Image (cartoon, grey):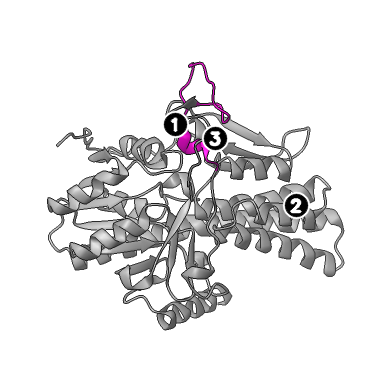
Amino acid sequence: MADQYARTGEDMRSTGMPVIRWEEPPEGPVVVLLDQTRLPTEEVERVCTDASALVEAIRSLAVRGAPLLGIAGAYGVALAAARGFDVDEAAAALSGARPTAVNLSVGVRRAASAYRSALAEGGDTGAAAAAALVAARALHREDAEASARMAEHGLALLDELLPGGGHRILTHCNTGSLVSGGEGTAFAVALRAHRAGRLRRLWVDETRPLLQGARLTAYEAARSGMAYTLLTDNAAGSLFAAGEVDAVLIGADRIAADGSVANKVGSYPLAVLARYHHVPFIVVAPVTTVDPETPDGASIEVEQRPGYEVTEVTAPQVPVAGAGGGIPVAPLGTQAYNPAFDVTPPELVTAIVTEEGAVSPVTAEALAELCARSRQVTIS
């Protein structure tokens, strides 16, 4: 089959510049983002001077991915505080920017809580803003550490389920360093397998919306020297039928208390295919993605994307005529069903891998125990 050249030797970092960072130029603090809508053709940064600019970056998917959204949300609160804007208003706007991604609201709450606690303890707004920034930076650092532990636990699970190496892994959407303070979630496991010489092939779904697998995962795999092949989402079934997939690794934007997993649309069909073909279906996500307040999959709000993302395609330096700024590929007035996510029930999930270890089988009781253990580790 068509093959991307696999480079040996020292790997390059998946991106040439930081995905997100805080800067303090003379004119005031800013949050600087790598604009992921411009990849893979350009590495361009977007500078956000207030929370509203960050909200727009989140909605447009310039910054995306569950763990990174949490970090961005925390920095957004710190930015509002440092620039003297209404913190509660900024926090509400940031939390609502991507309703399915629970990490976003977790990061927002963490920085906002630090801000309010500093005020309650008698500090002025400057001290409170500094406290919010400390919380955001701590979350950023913790996510990098969690990423490394997820990669370790994930590879150990793969080796247990599939002894002998030579793993052929199918992944969906983008879950690498572009979504994380570290090297990612599911992609980090595949990258660890690659570095250990145990990855035979990374199958990359192109992934709607915005072809995030084709544009971003293939970009990261190429820069990391991994053997990878890109496929259309609806070609995955033929790979399973041919016996070419050993495991499916995906991330998650929200995991309900019962173990239902919301991830990029197309994940649920992969879980069904994996079950039929007796292939492990593994979800890799930090504990912060588990939402005890969401009881089950039916309670997860699924974001609906604009229809023009389906009825149009975009291409640089080409005249456009569509409402969304792209080239129409469907008749004018065509309605499109374009959910950003779907929900996979826990009975189709082989394991959920977190920084605290793996849960298998996936049950509400096992997830509750994992979350309780994580809180104890954090407190200690």
**Mark 2 burial class by Cα count in 10 Å: few <14, some 14-19, many 20+:** many
**Three-letter residue code for mark 3:** Asp
Q: Disc 2 residue type?
A: Ala
Mark nearer the N terminus (3 vs 2): 3
Whole-number angstrom distance, CA of label 3 to CA of label 2: 21 Å
Percent from the top left, x then y, of residue 186? Answer: 36, 55
Q: In this view, does 189 lie above or below 355?
A: above
- Give the x, y percent position of residue 288: 52, 65
Write the start and end of the magenta stretch as one range: 306-326
- Is residue 21 found inside the magenta-colored segment of the image? no
Q: Mark 2 points at which residue?
A: 90
Mark 3 — residue?
A: 35
| SS state under label 1 | loop
* Quadrant of res 96: bottom right
The answer to whether residue 197 is seen in the rendering is no
Q: CB under 8 Å between callouts 3 and 2?
A: no
Out of 354 and 291, give the one closest to the viewer: 291
Between the residue at mark 1 and the residue at mark 3, the CA separation in whole angstroms equals 28 Å
Q: Residue placed at 78% from the left, 54% from the top?
A: 89
Instruction: Please tell me the numbered disc located at residue 330.
Output: 1
The location of residue 62, given as percent across then percent down, is 55, 39
